[in-house]
Amino acid sequence: MKNVRFLLLLLLLLLANCAKPDQPTAPTPVTPVEEIEPADTATSPALETVPPVAATEETVEEPVSSFEPSFENAPCPFDIPTGADIECGYVVVPEDHNNPGGATIRLAIVIVKDQSEDHQPDPAILLSGGPGEKTVENAQGLINLFPHAHPNRDLIVFDQRGVGLSEPSLECPHWVDAQYDILDETDPLLAAETIFNALMECRDALVNEGHNLSAYNTTQSASDVNAIRLALGYDKVNLIGGSYGSFLAQEVARQYPEIIRSMVVFSVWPLQVNFFVESPLVTSNAVLDMLAACQADPDCSQAYPNLDDTLFETIEKLNEEPELISVTHVLTGEEYDVLLSGDRVFSTLVGLLYQTELIPMLPQAIYDVSNGDYDLIAQLLGVHLSLYGALSRGMEFSVICAEDMIGVDVGDLLENLDELPEALKGEDDTDLLMQYGIFAICEQWPVEMADTSFKDALVSNIPTLLLEGEFDPVTPTEFAQLLADNLSDSHLFEFPGIGHNIAVATDCSRQMIGGFFEDPSQAPSASCISEIDTGFNIRYEDPAGRYAVPLLPKWTTEDKQDFLSISNPEASIMAFVLVLDEDNFADASNAAWEIVDQDIHGETTANAQPCRGCAAADADRFAIIVYDTGNEEELVLAAAWIFEGKTYLIIFQTDPATLDDKSAQLNSMIMGFTISAMEAADDQADQDQ
């Protein structure tokens, strides 16, 4: 397959997973990974620092506008949790803030009212990623996830202009459909042409609907943030911006420094960086860093030796002879034929580095593919497919084409492609890139390019906390350092083992955000870092040959007479693996708990469902089982598979707080759990074919 196909079709997808609060894996949301400490990271030599322009209260004048933004109450698009004080609606703003008497648009918004006795008047405003990430429809997950990040303050969540439930929403269903259509396409020219034509269809539809696409950009969105502040009656605000949200936060700070009390940015995209030009080097470096981390870990290197050579050889082999595999969409359950080329393996690894809870599984996925076992990569691809609809693509391309293409051309992109390791280059097709790549798309996208001064670096004295992930595949620590170099009152931390979107990956980061908002005059405490687990999964093979389960290296196992006992290093999670001669979830779960702990009795509830996010997805039946022990401080749940008359269970015993913080580790055990009899049946079926 052509590397340009990977670049055109998949760099666009990298923007899709910037701040998703709920991940489509197993029973619960995302989790943390490693240690954190202040970063002393040098500026990347691949980046040129643009001369900065200072933004201070004395030098920036607020744009004059006679329009008074207003708030219109509306029903919330989700169930409000019991006891919560949440208000939903729309803030009405000009489509073009430079023309306040012209057309108006409506921004969908959720206000989570703080009810504490020590209520503070300055709210936290969440600036979502993308560009184009749909946030309000996921607001309930954010509300549950973010309480530590906005102590004693209101939290404001909104869909940016042109996004999600805001009106209008610049959707591109043609683009989404085209992505599914080309999953099994063998001709890179036809694939690139299909995507390009779908975008042009979207462009025509949006223009015919009367939308001024040039009004959907970061400068206008920054004025929206100020308009929200005015409409809701706040004086000062605190900003939380991740990925593209960090980009928007910088523009708000440049235009309206006087309204910002403090600012937290994570997965930082500096204003002066051209995302698409830098992406090839950034993404390849992130994967190489992950491979190097495995080789530096004694357990990982022993389980997966020579991981970099294994990956490169696998990419080259599958580029020459791609495999057609079946992938199940983790949300819809729909099955797709997917052509697994080497480039798709690599791009999938890049996309999965967004989701920290999946990173520990990647060395095993690489080795499995190298050995012709595609079960795990198929499951991971099923998660990846769910990202296609995460963004409002019309808004995304309006921002990218107006702002990211400033000062660069296709030659700059080709220079960076030339610097990639040979195994990651594929067969570059310059003509194809020129005809259908991002520069060709932007030539046809009807927006005015921003002035070159837009790419000037932000200079500010606003108290700022910057958070980065070691394995971030698109916004590395070097990017955050570029921004921090021009912030006189800032604190930068790097999280080892974390991918993109630190605020979702670990509660430690959210505690630090909350601590910083409490007192932005100093760096927040990072004492929670030592409690964060890290490492890569190592497969535990059942001595009786019945199953395998992935575990982080520091977890301990004890083989009991009738079950396997597993514990995390803090002993805050106990897991028990059993195989019973039962083909009924209720009977099996009750019998299993009697074996594990006869002192606990309670009702069990089995929620039968497809196992779309696990390697044992083809079991006869799957269920998540909840045990009601009568103790609110104890949480017992299980994942259970029935295959050929036997029930395979992983029972987890923990507490609610630990589950919230370490749920990804439970998810990875469920996703990677394999049933040996099922694997043998699959191997036999392959031989029969």
Image: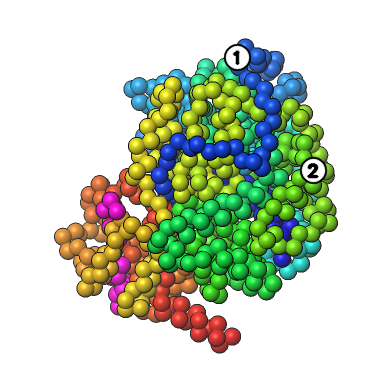
**Residue 584 position within the rendered picture, expressed as x and y whole percent measured from the top left:** 33, 72
Left or right placement of residue 639 versus residue 457 in this view: left
What's under tag 1, amino acid-wise? Answer: Glu
User: Looking at the image, which residue is at 36% across and 68% down?
Assistant: 540
For the residues labelled 1 and 2, say whether their Cβ atoms are less than 8 Å apart.
no
Q: Which of the pair 400/158 is nearer the observer?
A: 400
User: Looking at the image, which residue is at 25% across and 59% down?
Assistant: 603
Q: Which of the pair 90/401 is nearer the observer?
A: 401
Asked whether the viewer can see residue 175, the reply is no
Quarter holding the C terminus? bottom right
Q: Which mark is residue 409?
A: 2
The color scheme shown is: rainbow
User: Looking at the image, which residue is at 45% across and 36% down?
Assistant: 38
Q: In the structure shown, which secondary structural element does the residue marked by tag 1 occupy?
A: loop
Q: Which mark is residue 57?
A: 1
- The span shown in magenta is 569-589
Is 9 situated above or below 97?
below
> Which dot, 1 or 2, sits closer to the camera?
2
Asked whether the viewer can see residue 279, the reply is yes
What's under tag 2, amino acid-wise? Answer: Asp
Q: Which of the pair 350/636 is nearer the observer?
A: 350
Is 189 situated above or below 105?
below
Assess whether residue 343 is covered by the magenta stretch: no
Q: Residue furthest top?
A: 58
**Residue 215 position within the rendered picture, expressed as x and y whole percent measured from the top left:** 74, 31
